[in-house]
Image: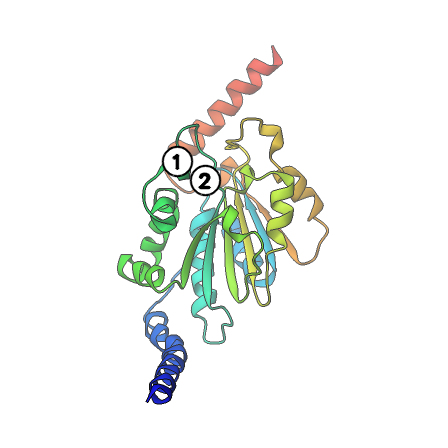
Amino acid sequence: MAKTTSKTRRTKNEEDFEMEPLQQQPILSSIKVNLKCKTEKQKTLCKLIESKDVTIAAGPAGTGKTYVACAEALRLLIAPTSTFKKIVIVKSVTVLEGEDIGYLKGNMKEKMEPFMNSFMDNFYKIIGKENSVALLASEIIEILPLAYIRGRSIDEAIIIIDESQNMPKHHLKSTVTRIGEKSKMIFLADEDQVDLKNKKDSGLTWFLDVTADLDEFGTMRFTKDDVVRNPLISKFLKHIEEKESTQNSI
């Protein structure tokens, strides 16, 4: 009797394992991505993400870096010939003293939630809240703090690393080594928003320089002129730049 029970359990587990991808498929088949790029640089960023193993998108807020990265990742994920199984969002969590992720209540997903609003807002805009929540619940979208990808090799995934301007040189180096078989990486960065105590610890400039002549890497640099959000953002950033330039020349 014990043998029969054991065999039945084993068969059930095997059937559950085999059914898992089939349960996910209806979620993906119902999703449509209609990305209309607003600038030539956004179009180029899409092409880089599609053609390169690693893409670095650097530039100020409001240029559409995150939106385009999310939309293109979804488009690649749902493509009929896609070999990708999920989108992994990695966040470099650099916060003010006393507001570290460890002080927040809940499990890791709950702790990460406040840091991921910018991503989820974009997913909501692209495919709607219901589809976004469904992909998150089924772990087709996976959210991780930077520390959790160390030691892992992430296969068949589109990996988006946010706030990479807050990563020192050795973190950027080790993060690239986490890319697995049939995967892509997208690094998002804003050179003007380094939150490290010593801004010189940011490895972004080094990363951009060292990968410039590697065919597998693509780089898109946005400027304040590429801001597509509220025009006030571009005006404000340019005004600050002019003020700082005048002060430094005195």
**What is the quadrant of the C terminus in the image?**
top right
Where is residue 34 drawn, in percent x and y?
A: 38, 62
**SS at circle 2:** loop
**SS at circle 1:** helix
Q: In this view, does 219 lie above or below 137?
A: above
Which residue in the structure is indicated by mark 1?
A: 231
Contact between marks 2 and 1 (CB within 8 A): the answer is: yes
Front-lying residue, 128 or 16 = 16
Left or right position of 93 against 19: right
Front-lying residue, 233 or 67 = 67
The residue sitting at 73% across, 51% down in the picture is: 213
User: Would residue 148 be visible to someone looking at this image?
Assistant: yes
Where is residue 151 drawn, in percent x and y?
A: 58, 55
Labelled disc at residue 227:
2
Q: Distance between the residues labelled 2 and 1?
A: 7 Å
The residue sitting at 64% across, 38% down in the picture is: 205
Left or right position of 128 against 200: left
Q: How is the image coloured?
A: rainbow
Amino acid type at image mark 2: Val
Q: Is residue 186 above or below residue 62?
A: below
